[in-house]
Amino acid sequence: MVELKSKAEIERMRKACGIVREVLEKVEKEIKPGITTKSIDILAENIIVSRSARPSFKNYRGYPASICASVNEVVVHGIPSDYVLKDGDIISVDVGAYIDGFHGDAARTFLVGECSEVAKKLVDVTRESFFKGIEFAKHMFRLSDISHAIQKYVEENGFEVIRDYYGHGIGRELHEDPTIPNYGKPNRGIRLRPGMVLAIEPMVVEKRYTVKTLEDGWTVVTEDGGLAAHYENTVAITTNGPEILTL
């Protein structure tokens, strides 16, 4: 069941979303060749805790870190480690924060040093596909209109969207209804209504969309080793259209 949030509740969500935004802005400044993904996790956790919030992901279903740090062929749920970023890597950083009873959630993919042209295009297309999707995040459009717009834009640009992982509703719980695929035919599913708050998150790959999970039980990688990118924001559906709370 999709829980609608009141205006007052959406206002409370701004605090968590603002912390997520701050983390991503500060992380972006630190990402460069030579730093470890674990150091990015420590930075993110310190910011979140210093704002009297807690990391949404840490210990969620046993997840061991405060952020997801997914490098190159890792699609989602990369666990921060001693891996040292090098020139030409791309890294997706997914951040969640919980405060005052609500979560905020967003992700970005960053270029590390000088990257290939295909990596740059993948990151750009992934980000832009989000904005194509939220053109339909409006009252009375259907959920699949968002999904279709994302898939259409991605495939027109020569990439594919992941099928096995989705966006989601968000609020008092990190993952709420509805599930939001990044693919599908338009004009399907529930109609969007003011008060819905959605984490819309295109996950896009360079080659085929098939994935596998590594032995750690978390890290999801492309089966063919192609690059993957991720872009996510928490979005409130309002009577005036979509409002991106994490930008």
Image (cartoon, grey):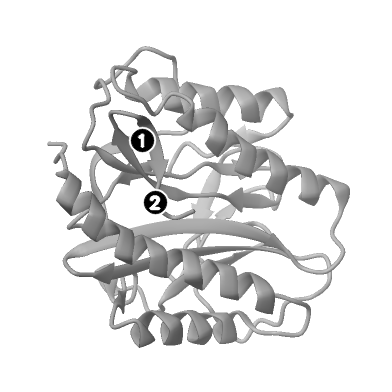
- Regarding residue 245, the answer to whether it shows in the image is yes
Name the residue located 19 percent from the left edge and 45 percent from the top edge. 7
Of the residues tagged 2 and 1, which is closer to the observer?
2
Amino acid carrying mark 2 in the image: Leu
Question: Which of the pair 191/229 is nearer the observer?
Answer: 191
Image position, residue 131 (x, y; %): 55, 35
**Crowd band around label 1 with a 10 angstrom C-alpha radius: few (<14), some (14–19), many (20+):** many
Q: Is residue 146 above or below residue 121?
A: above
Q: Judging from the image, what secondary structure is the residue with disc 2 in?
A: loop
Quickly name the residue at label 1: 180
Instruction: Inspect the image, locate mark 1, and give the three-letter code of the amino acid beneath it.
Output: Ile
- Name the residue at 58% across, 87% down: 39
Residue 245: mark: 2
**Residue 218 visible in the shown view:** no
- Residue 244: x and y in percent read 43, 45
Relative to 184, 9 lies left or right = left
Instruction: Name the residue at the top extreme.
Output: 187
Residue 155 is drawn in which quadrant?
top right
- At mark 1, the secondary structure is strand
Residue 142 position, x and y percent, is 32, 19
Q: What residue appears at the point 68 percent right and 38 percent down from the top-left corner?
A: 125
- Is 15 left or right of 109, judged from the image as shown? left
**206 versus 108 height, above or below:** above
